């Protein structure tokens, strides 16, 4: 007989959870520091450079913040969007594919619709991206609702199909292919016309992209949507138990379809903002946000304010690592992914400790 | 002309056996009710660690053992997090992929930048151990002999593993118990099957098998390390797709490997075929290679949808897949 068994804690307190998370993250940084030390890099110096993302003693430090925010926006929106679907226990791991679909749709508008004011062009790009990504989400949701097709595997396949679509567009020189530079013999993605670029607000030397403001506003809106609206309540009921939702008279299929449309459309929007900020498209435009977003959403326990904080910290980790790595030949940017993995493993352990107790079975039970 | 066709069919097997390893490994894990999306990372870790161990010792057996153990440890981590600690399987698997591929590059770059440099396959004794083995008599059959019976040993081992696994699932008691856990862990538990133990063992073995596949991938690419291209190159993801295509059967996985391998090989070699048989296969040149690359995923998507549409045909998909088993929730 097993002597011990697990009991889910009824009183999972936020304070305790945060404490264990902090211990887990510190432990992973410690492991990261040991790896650095083994490779002959001073960990304190490296982490210092990483977490300050090269701001200290840098005249052009504001450029680093601009770069960080440019990467932060797609990750934040994607993570928020994925949290929406995960809340219903709908495993949309197709963030990459939905992002690429949005990026392609937005780029079609950017290249083809010219002569309109900047604001209108970008708005059209966003709409095109949201509709095309949203439709993918709805198609997957419809199959799941109607025929119970495995959504995890479906969305996984879509990621790779879309990846080859964009590779095809990027590597095929042809008359129809308006995505590419005309003057170049080799296939290279062209730059958008000026009207398709994301605008920005200058603050001194620093220019704040509109996309950052949109992303923050969206995060607040989704937070309110989930917390204070009927839709948000329905999502959480479906997530807890779709049977309960059904008995409560909710139309589960409709809720799943609607939420998946919103979730994927938001990922499309993230893509539109990303291509518009970059002024071009590429097959690495996703910057892996579809994958990282899943990790962020889970680390944050699908809590929107936590998603905001976590995605920012993960972005600092990733972006800071790129910058710090450029100064140490022994380390490259893979260190960020390595560390990110270790952090997630430790947090999963911390999560367990915070939510479960190991209880010794009474001897009487064994007798 | 016939040479080109022979080479084409030969390449289908040589380049795509890692798919068979990845797929059989994943089938073993999924049959226990766990969906492990970390195939790519698990294969990458087994590949780099196993290769370096093999290059150091000059022994293919040592390379395989180390690859198996290294990936098995990754499987142990997955099992510990998802079975004991009840962590979400999708998230854990994806993290293993992120971590594993980063680990591959990290170790690879560290060794490549070290004083001794990256050990190449030709310079080590390991190189001579990876030569093709011509099976007596059978390899002398024209055409077929070259395609099927003159391969490196790990090709045969991969096929043997698949056949053994098929036998294990179908004909043995532990195999039956394993499938029961994948379908309904609570029912299996109430019949006295040690669910956690079964999950641990099969996740570890399945991951180990993936590791050997990763090692093979590296050996087949001549063991040359490139800082920008991982040896596994998406084969882990194709393996996950192949599990669905094979309907969770190790025997069908062999067939699936040939079908997916056909498209993989076509991606690289379609121009050769079109050139050799201009009238019959000239049209191949009109199709972009990206289409062949995407085809395994498109086919899998269609299979996935079609199998959920048809209620009659029994799907091999374990019913409890992706959900953790927690006794108190029973």
Image: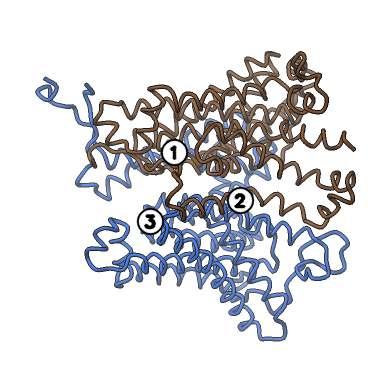
Chain colours: A blue, B brown
A197 or A99, which is in the foreground?
A: A99
Q: How far apart are marks 3 and 2 (CA)?
A: 33 Å
In the image, taking residue B265 as reference, residue A58 lies left or right, namely left
Label 3 in the same subunit as label 2? no
Extreme residue toward the bottom, this view: A116
Element marked by disc 3: loop
Element under label 2? Answer: helix
**Are the numbered discs 1 and 3 placed on the same chain, yes or no?**
yes
Q: Could you say which disc has been placed on residue A345 in the image? A: 1
Q: Nearer the viewer, residue B81 or A324?
A: B81
Q: Residue at x 67, y 70 (%)?
A: A107
The numbered dot on residue B299 is: 2
Q: Position of residue A294 (x, y in %)?
A: 47, 52
Task: Give the x, y percent position of residue B287.
Answer: 78, 56
Between the C-alphas of marks 1 and 3, the distance is 17 Å
Judge whether residue B215 can be spotted in this image: yes
Which chain is mark 2 on? B
What residue do we see at 72% from left, 78% from top? A112
Residue B76 location, x and y as percent? 45, 28
How crowded is the residue under tag 2: few (<14 C-alpha within 10 Å), some, or many (20+)? some
Residue occupying image coordinates x 18% and y 27%: A360
């Amino acid at each position: 007989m097993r002597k011990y068994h697990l009991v889910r804690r009824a009183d999972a307190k936020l304070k305790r959870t945060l404490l264990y998370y902090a211990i887990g993250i510190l432990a992973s940084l410690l492991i990261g520091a040991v790896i650095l030390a083994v490779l002959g890099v001073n960990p304190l110096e490296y982490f210092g450079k990483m977490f300050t993302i090269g701001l200290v003693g840098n005249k052009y430090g504001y450029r680093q913040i601009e770069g960080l925010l440019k990467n932060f926006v797609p990750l934040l929106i994607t993570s928020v969007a994925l949290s929406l679907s995960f809340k219903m226990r709908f495993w949309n791991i197709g963030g990459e594919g939905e992002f690429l679909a949005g990026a392609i749709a937005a780029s079609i508008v950017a290249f083809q619709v010219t002569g309109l004011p900047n604001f209108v062009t970008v708005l059209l790009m966003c709409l095109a991206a949201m509709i095309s990504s949203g439709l993918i989400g709805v198609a997957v949701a419809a199959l799941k609702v109607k025929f119970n097709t495995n959504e995890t595997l479906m969305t996984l396949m879509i990621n790779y199909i879309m990846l080859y679509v964009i590779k095809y567009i990027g590597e095929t020189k042809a008359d129809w292919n308006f995505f590419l530079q005309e003057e170049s013999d080799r296939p290279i993605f062209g730059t958008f016309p000026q009207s398709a670029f994301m605008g920005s607000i200058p603050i001194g030397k620093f220019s704040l992209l509109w996309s950052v403001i949109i992303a923050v506003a969206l995060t607040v809106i989704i937070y309110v949507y989930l917390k204070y609206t009927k839709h948000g309540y329905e999502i959480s009921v479906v997530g807890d138990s779709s049977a309960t939702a059904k008995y409560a008279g909710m139309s589960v299929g409709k809720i799943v379809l609607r939420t998946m449309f919103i979730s994927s459309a938001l990922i499309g929007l993230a893509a539109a903002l990303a291509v518009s900020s970059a002024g071009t498209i590429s097959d690495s435009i996703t910057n892996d946000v579809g994958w990282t977003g899943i990790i962020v959403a889970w680390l944050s326990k699908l809590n929107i304010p936590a998603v905001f904080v976590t995605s920012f910290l993960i972005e600092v980790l990733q972006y800071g690592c790129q910058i710090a790595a450029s100064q140490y030949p022994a380390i490259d940017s893979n260190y960020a992914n390595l560390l990110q993995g270790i952090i997630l493993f430790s947090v999963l352990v911390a999560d367990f400790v915070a939510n479960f107790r190991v209880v010794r079975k009474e001897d009487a039970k064994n007798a | 002309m016939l040479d080109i066709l022979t080479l084409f069919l030969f390449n289908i097997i040589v380049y795509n056996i890692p798919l068979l390893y990845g797929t059989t490994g994943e089938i073993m894990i999924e049959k226990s009710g766990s969906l492990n999306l970390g195939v790519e990372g698990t294969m990458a870790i087994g590949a780099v660690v196993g290769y370096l161990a093999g290059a150091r010792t000059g022994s293919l057996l040592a390379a395989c053992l180390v690859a198996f153990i290294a990936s098995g440890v990754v499987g142990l981590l997955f099992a510990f997090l998802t079975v004991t600690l009840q962590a979400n399987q999708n998230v854990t698997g994806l993290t293993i992929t992120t971590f594993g591929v980063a680990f591959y590059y990290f170790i690879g770059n560290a060794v490549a930048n070290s004083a001794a440099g990256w050990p190449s396959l030709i310079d080590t004794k390991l190189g001579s151990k990876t030569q093709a083995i011509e099976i007596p008599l059978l390899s002398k059959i024209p055409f077929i002999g070259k395609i099927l019976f003159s391969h490196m040993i790990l090709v045969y081992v991969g096929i043997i593993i698949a056949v053994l696994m098929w036998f294990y699932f179908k004909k043995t008691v532990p195999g039956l118990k394993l499938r029961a856990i994948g379908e309904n862990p609570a029912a299996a538990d109430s019949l006295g099957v040690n669910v956690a133990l079964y999950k641990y063992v099969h996740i570890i073995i399945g991951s180990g098998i993936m590791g050997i596949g990763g090692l093979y991938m590296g050996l087949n690419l001549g063991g040359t390390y490139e800082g920008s291209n991982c040896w596994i190159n998406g084969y882990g993801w194709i393996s996950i797709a192949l599990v669905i295509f094979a309907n969770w059967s190790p025997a069908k996985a062999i067939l699936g490997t040939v079908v997916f391998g056909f498209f993989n090989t076509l991606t690289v070699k379609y121009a050769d075929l079109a050139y050799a048989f201009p009238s019959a296969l000239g049209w191949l040149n009109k199709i972009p290679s990206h289409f062949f690359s995407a085809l395994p995923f498109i086919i899998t998507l269609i299979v996935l949808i079609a199998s959920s549409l048809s209620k009659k045909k029994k799907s091999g998909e374990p019913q409890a897949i992706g959900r953790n088993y927690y006794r108190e929730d029973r």
